[in-house]
Amino acid sequence: MKKNNRKLSIGNVIEEGRIGGPQKRILSVANSITKMVNTTIIFPKDNSKELQAYCKLYKIKFHTLTLTTPKKNWIIFLKYLIYFPYEILTLFFFFKKNQFDVIHVSGGSWQFKGVIAAKLARIKVVWELNDTYVPFLIKFFFFFFSYLADSFIFASHRTKNYYASLISKNKKNFLIQSPVDTNFFDPEKKYPLDRYCKKILKNKIVIGTVANISPVKNLICLIKSSKDLNFLSNEIVFIVVGSIYKNQRKHYKDLKNLIRKLKIKNFFFLGSRKDIRPILKKIDIYVCCSKNESSPLSVWEAMSMKKAIISTDVGDVAKFITHEVNGFLLTKSNGAILGNRIKKLLTSRKLRLKFGKLSRKIAKKKLDLKICSNLHIKTYRSIING
């Protein structure tokens, strides 16, 4: 068998066990390239039950380790620093034992351990960057550790530009957007909706978003826009689908208090869902209010489901959503501006359908999982072949 056709062995490391965009990306790509690539996903034991369940469901190899994650809490951060050398050694021994062809470090520029361990194990490493903002201290350390990586994957053009001054020009780099499985996110299929959602969404025009309850997602903007549209409260409903993690509970309470203060009766947090397609299908207008994104998977999924989209101009959204052609872009995110854009779509079902139809075509042509998977295989082979 020719070297270029042999099955590759990839160790994909992510230092956050909770399910989010990066974890979904790892799972979908690993499952898609299984005929060409053996992927082992390495992640922390803590907060990873859902991720472990998905690995078992897709029959993807995985290995859990004690990997601490830095937090703003100083005790947890101190623990992170103390265990840092031990966790690098743990990764090093696991990499050496499994003799991976490439270590793929996912999750962003703060995930140093996999890079250091791979270098110690003399295994080539590709570092995936998927953010457009990090604190100065992380950027400072990333500048030094970036020299250890053999190459980089950028999740968007905006991410590439953000890190351009910190990475040597001699390093190989690849641009791969977050993928959406357009066959899985198919608007023509029927999806069963649970009783609670049926009740609150029945006979309503649904404005919604999929996001965890983080300040970065700027859900305050969506809440304020719903206040401006309160006179339509019998006709429309606002929903947020996403997890509420421990460190986000205070922010969640603040959002709920704001809703009560503004006397909004038609705004609902639906929590996380294993399958978001039934709710996505019911959404008429999809909104992304985020302050920072790179390649926002939730937006691509909404595009695949033929949704009319209003989004802040974050990450590479403007590469795939053209203002007033297949959606609305917001250069400034405040409730009044967002409310006006929502009004335009509320008054024209024809425009909503037009935006959604065009977005589905773009998602299939430029963001489909097959495209992203093929780029991953080419990337791995390029790194191995030098």
Image: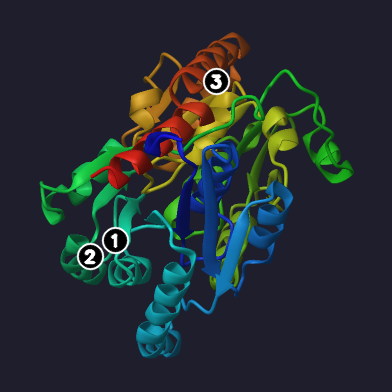
Name the residue that disc number 3 marks.
345
Sequence-wise first label, 1 or 2? 1
The numbered dot on residue 134 is 1
Pinpoint residue 195: horizontal percent, then vertical percent. Answer: 89, 42
Figure check: 353 above or below 231: above
Q: Nearer the viewer, mark 3 or mark 2?
A: 2
For the residues labelled 1 and 2, the Cα–Cα distance comes to 10 Å
Mark 2 Cα-neighbour bin, 10 Å: few <14, some 14–19, many ≥20: some
For the residues labelled 3 and 2, the Cα–Cα distance comes to 43 Å
The numbered dot on residue 142 is 2
- Quadrant position of residue 328: top left
Pinpoint residue 303: horizontal percent, then vertical percent. Answer: 54, 26
Residue 303 visible in the snapshot: yes
- Residue drawn at x 25%, y 50% as measured from the top left: 151
Amino acid at dot 3: Leu
Pinpoint residue 228: horizontal percent, then vertical percent. Answer: 54, 38
Amino acid at dot 1: Val
Query: Callout 2: helix, strand or loop?
Result: helix
Asked whether 351 or 33 is in front, the reply is: 33
Query: Callout 3: helix, strand or loop?
Result: helix
Mark 3 Cα-neighbour bin, 10 Å: few <14, some 14–19, many ≥20: many
Q: Nearer the viewer, mark 1 or mark 2?
A: 2
Position of 214 with respect to 188 (left or right) is: left
Asked whether 373 or 158 is in front, the reply is: 373
Pinpoint residue 382: horizontal percent, then vertical percent. Answer: 29, 39
Sequence-wise first label, 1 or 3? 1
For the residues labelled 1 and 3, the Cα–Cα distance comes to 34 Å
Residue extending farthest to the right is 195
Task: Determine whether label 1 and label 2 are within 8 Å by CB.
Answer: yes
